[in-house]
């Protein structure tokens, strides 16, 4: 039996409320409107994916459980989108992944072996996260202890015992500090990335895991990785970026060529987090508005464990840095060269 992959840790946020939406070209502005609306009600997002396609957009939102009832009553779904029914859920996060495809691959493989279908995946510089329906959370917790090890916690029971009494601490994190220009530790860029997209049913997850393992063996970093619901939740639409086009073509060896779309132009991936990204509402709405005001087309956005990662066209890196600097206090920028 392979030796478990050591990770720094994992955490589960439960309960949470999960909401998905999708629409055509007229829905491009809907994720921003939704983010701005819930920010007005001081509701914080703990999970977010937004994917923009030539034909439309898809987005998923996770709201912490103690705000879920209020959110259900107050939020308004933009009329340009079709929204799924809110789902009682949880969010499991593994860290650090250090852009290693092996971490995402092992997570997907562990779920596929047990026919456990997640709601969505998100990745940031901090962690890889999966949104889960509440009823499979305990099964997933057990599943991740097979491919991964987490320091002193040798079993799910060890981990559960260590969490006793911490639930209220998590719930007491509130947005108590609202800067006009939120501070960012740093803005980091990775240029020269190729975007690949594919829509997969659960039975094809093992093939995706095999492709990610192959990338890992070749030393290919996975700079961006998200999955949003598709086909009324029967499938997941994955978006990922890797350096150099030939690396993305590894997917073709493991998945149907017809199911994969590999972008022609290069993209750039940005990462940033800040001291209040975990408890401050309104961050995502400010970012989306900054890009809209600058006339920039965001390709994809993901937020996981208080950190934001996004994808844009490579030629827009400088303009995007200016746009982000207009709403965030950014002391340093790296990776522009």
Image (spheres, helix red, strand yellow):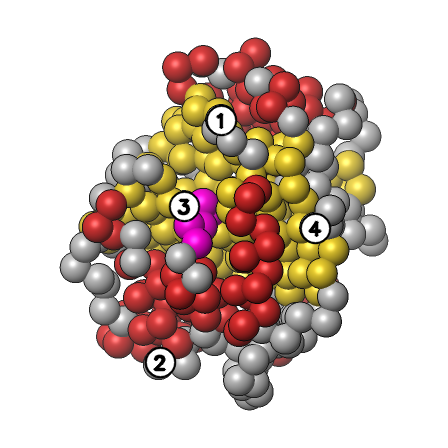
Q: Say the numbered circle drawn on residue 264.
A: 1
Q: Which residue is mark 2?
A: 40
Q: Position of residue 71 (x, y in %)?
A: 32, 73
Q: Main secondary structure of the magenta part?
A: strand
Question: Disc 1 and disc 3: Cα gap in Å?
Answer: 17 Å
Quarter holding residue 61? bottom left
Q: Which residue is mark 3?
A: 51
Question: Which mark's residue is nearer the viewer, 1 or 3?
Answer: 1
Q: Tag 2 or tag 4, which sits nearer the N-term?
A: 2
**Left or right: 328 in relation to 32:** right
Mark 1–mark 2 contact, CB under 8 Å? no
Q: Say the numbered circle drawn on residue 336.
A: 4
Q: Is residue 228 magenta?
A: no
Q: Determine the secondary structure under disc 2.
A: helix
Q: Does residue 23 lie above or below 272 as drawn?
A: above
Whether residue 122 is visible to the viewer of this picture, yes or no, is no
- The stretch of residues the image draws in magenta is 296-300
- Front residue of 209 and 13: 209
Question: Disc 2 and disc 3: Cα gap in Å?
Answer: 23 Å
Q: Residues within 10 Å of mark 2 (few under 14, many from 20)?
A: few
**Residue for point 73% across, 46% down:** 337
- Front residue of 204 and 141: 204
Question: Disc 1 and disc 4: Cα gap in Å?
Answer: 21 Å
Q: Tag 3 or tag 1, which sits nearer the N-term?
A: 3
Q: Position of residue 259 (x, y in %)?
A: 40, 19
Question: Disc 1 and disc 2: Cα gap in Å?
Answer: 39 Å
Q: Say the numbered circle drawn on residue 170.
A: none
Mark 1–mark 3 contact, CB under 8 Å? no
Mark 4–mark 2 contact, CB under 8 Å? no
Mark 1–mark 4 contact, CB under 8 Å? no
């Amino acid at each position: 039996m392979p030796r478990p992959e050591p990770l720094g840790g994992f955490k589960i946020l439960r309960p949470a409320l999960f909401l998905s939406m999708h629409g055509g070209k007229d829905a491009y502005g809907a994720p921003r409107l939704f983010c701005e609306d819930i920010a007005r009600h001081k509701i914080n997002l703990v999970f977010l994916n937004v994917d923009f396609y030539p034909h439309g957009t898809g987005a998923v939102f996770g709201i912490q459980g103690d705000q879920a009832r209020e959110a259900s009553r107050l939020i308004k779904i933009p009329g340009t989108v079709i929204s799924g029914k809110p789902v009682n859920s949880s969010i499991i996060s593994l860290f650090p992944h250090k852009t290693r495809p092996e971490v995402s691959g092992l997570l997907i493989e562990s779920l596929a072996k047990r026919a456990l279908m997640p709601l969505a995946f998100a990745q940031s510089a901090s962690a890889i996260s999966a949104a889960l329906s509440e009823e499979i959370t305990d099964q997933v917790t057990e599943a991740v202890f097979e491919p991964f090890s987490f320091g002193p916690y040798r079993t799910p029971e060890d981990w559960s015992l260590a969490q006793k009494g911490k639930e209220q601490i998590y719930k007491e994190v509130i947005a108590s500090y609202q800067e006009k220009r939120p501070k960012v530790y740093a803005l980091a860029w990775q240029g020269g990335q190729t975007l690949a997209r594919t829509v997969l049913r659960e039975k094809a997850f093992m093939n995706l895991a095999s492709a990610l393992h192959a990338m890992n063996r070749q030393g290919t970093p996975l700079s961006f990785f998200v999955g949003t619901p598709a086909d009324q939740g029967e499938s997941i639409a994955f978006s990922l970026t890797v350096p150099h086009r030939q690396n993305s073509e590894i997917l073709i060896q493991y998945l149907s060529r017809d199911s994969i779309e590999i972008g022609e132009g290069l993209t750039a991936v940005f990462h940033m987090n800040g001291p209040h990204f975990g408890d401050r509402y309104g961050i995502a709405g400010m970012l989306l508005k900054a890009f809209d005001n600058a006339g920039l087309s965001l390709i994809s956005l993901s937020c996981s464990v208080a950190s934001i990662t996004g994808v844009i066209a490579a030629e827009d890196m400088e303009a995007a840095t200016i746009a982000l600097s207009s709403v965030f206090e950014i002391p340093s920028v790296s990776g522009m060269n």
